[in-house]
Amino acid sequence: MKHILSALVLNKPGVLAHVAGMFAARAFNIDSLAVGRTDDPTLSRMTIVVVGDDRVVEQVRKQLAKLVSIVKVQDFAGQDMVARDLMLISIACPAEKRPEILALVEMFQAKVVDIGSKFVMVEVSGPENKVEAFIEACRQYGIKNMVRTGTVAMARQTQARTEGIADNSK
Amino acid sequence: MASKKQTQSTAVETKTGSQVLVDTLVEQGVDTLFGYLGGVVLPFFDKLYDSPIRVVIPRHEQGGCHMADAYARSTGKVGVVVATSGPGATNLTTGLATAMMDSVPLVALTCQVRTDLIGNDAFQAADTAGITRPITKHNVIVKDPNDLARTIREAFYIAATGRPGPVLVDIPVDMQIAQIPVTPAAPIELPGYRIRDRGHARQIASAAEAINASQRPVLYVGGGVISGNASEALRLFAKKANIPVTMTLLGLGAYDQNEPGSLDMLGMHGTAYANFAVQECDLLISVGARFDDRVTGKIQTFAPHAKIIHIDLDPASIAKNIAVDIPVVGNAKQVLADLAEKAEHRPRKEWFDRIADWKKRHPLRYDTKTDTIKPQYVIEEIWRQTKGRAIIVTGVGQHQMWTAQFYKFNKPRQFITSGGLGTMGFGLPAAIGAQVANPDALVVDIDGDSSFNMTLTEISTAVMYNLPVKVCILNNGCMGMVRQWQELFYGRRYSCSSLENPDFARIAEAFGAVGVRADKKQEVPEVITAMLAEKRPCVVDFHVDPEENVWPMVPAGKSLHEMDGLDIFEMA
Ligand SMILES: Cc1ncc(C[n+]2csc(CCOP(=O)(O)OP(=O)(O)O)c2C)c(N)n1
Ligand SMILES: [Mg+2]
């Protein structure tokens, strides 16, 4: 099963190496990793997606928590949370395909960020499965290039859904 | 923040980084360190010259690291080792990994090339932090001289607290030369480092309930009881609750083996009675142990009838290798004291009768009738003549297992051995470290010929510092443990497992130590008597039966009760 771990880490050199090294040394696999600053300049947030049975992931969580430079680790499994990926994708797009592709962009609530005579670059964000669905939908036109971030996630504060689209990222 | 305030005041006292280093070590209570020189560590050694700290120079940094390790294991204090950049630092790796696996509190200070040269393949530069990351509890490189004192304080704190371990601080030479304002020590703030001392009350309650309900309990204790200074708490708890105790290799000494409740060591070369008891118990109480594969054998069939209580300071240790029924995260001493309060005495006559029967039928044995020197005999004789009170150190191999089996330990920190990593060559430098820390103690290294070969250059250190360590080589002329596996599992094809040894006694003499050789069984007692009376470092080369094997043995991958060698004497 896929687990999203969110770790608050000290914003210091070497921390990423400690985390990556621990994963390698203990033969855990990272599915994706996203690192970014927080509102507190001394802390960063790492969102780590790992696949494994609950026992393995619990070990990952504990081993992460044990690292001196990691302040807090949370496993979002079973929690109500919002998880998002971001992708930039450049799709082959001759003039005659433009309307079709733009319709697709609209349907996915994506954004065109660059456009040329033979391509269109699109920014897509959302739950991982939405991003994946967009890739599938674009295959028929030809994907020239794409880049994705790892998942970032946050627990919901309230039970009420604030968005129209059901979040089925889990 | 404190430093800002200081710099605002007019007359700021400054010191060089190297002086701050030395002062901080003194402040941390360091009386001895093991260190080796090199270009970038010169400023630090220059300041050590006038300091009250005693410096012991090993002959190799690995030796220095093992010395600091044994200094720590034998006292409970943090050991300190210092090495220069590049090769000095890489020579520490085996020692750090050894300390890491056995949770030994160590601070390693390595020096580094100038900050502006890092990454440019400068002379004697190595990515020490990168190399040692997986073999230290924590490591840091100091990039701002103002961080020096704080970083050292944190290193000592992290090394000694929680589950102890080695912490490495890498210090570029410009940090040592820099003039830095002297600031008062700020309290340690490590938001990512928390230790849970007290077990959860509800977990303790359910553990106590399980203990009181158990008919056939066993305490399975490891090195955590020793490093957590919990031996006395263990004794009181085991006595009150009336529970037999088995120990891991690193746990030996945690419980007096002369007590009738001692099942001695369990595991691959453990006693039959310990292994049978674990396999038949209905409750296994693990304290400061980690269900290592050498202990459990086939994990799926380990303690198959038992409910498992796992008491450990390190939450990551719990449920890592085995499913646990009642986890208790906390300090062994505190948790055992809490449990003792709630535990009720149960007679458990049937259980103790069964154990007594196993003990009677399967004691540890060896053939006492041969003419050759049996290695076990040497160990028994050392035990007898030292009245079971020496600090015993070993290398790795058969001799290590026989020592664990035949020397009966009665107090913590008495047995110093590389368990987790199994580092050959640990013996002599560890004996030196233990002797430095305990000048009046009798320190005996029971070593293997191949293990001793790896670090015997440290005899020179023992001679230089007048350390009366005793080295007893159980010389079987081969890598005995490897030879045993080849005999049992590789059709007696003894590929590359024997070495041509030098004359160890003459080597010792050449180094300025006492060297003795013993070939005959009758000589053994008197040679040991003479050795123990010796005031100089002394190496005794016992030529023992080369064919002797360690029994019993649970072959790798088998269940604990599937021991070979129980009937070896009946068959003979
Ligand atoms: C540094 C190191 N290299 C290799 C090994 C693998 N090994 C384990 S025991 C052993 C043989 C040890 O021989 P010796 O020291 O003579 O002890 P004996 O088994 O003969 O008592 C070897 C090679 C090891 N544990 N450590
Ligand atoms: Mg040998």
Image (cartoon, coloured by chain):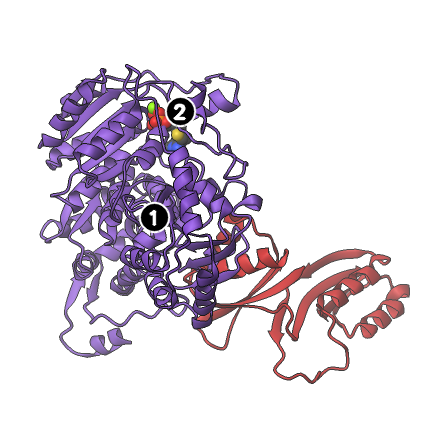
Chain colours: A red, B purple
Residue B145 position, x and y percent, is 27, 62
Q: Is residue B351 above or below residue A95?
A: above
Describe the element under mark 2 as helix, strand or loop.
Answer: loop
What distance separates the C-alpha of mark 2 from that of mark 1? Answer: 27 Å
Tally of numbered discs: 2
| Badge 2: residue crowd in 10 Å (few <14, some 14–19, many ≥20) | many
Q: In the drawing, what numbered circle is on residue B504?
A: none
Question: Is label 2 on the same chain as label 1?
Answer: yes
| Badge 1: residue crowd in 10 Å (few <14, some 14–19, many ≥20) | many
Question: Relative to residue A37, is residue B356 drawn left or right?
Answer: left
Q: What residue sits 42% from the left and 54% below the top?
A: B348
Residue A39 position, x and y percent, is 49, 77
Where is residue A157, by image quadrant?
Answer: bottom right
Q: Between residues B25 and B493, which one lies in front from this camera angle?
A: B493
Q: Between residues A13 and B344, which one lies in front from this camera angle?
A: B344
Q: Which residue is mark 2?
A: B549
Q: Is residue A84 above or below residue A54?
A: below
Residue B415 position, x and y percent, is 27, 42
Q: What residue sits 43% from the left and 22% below the top?
A: B570
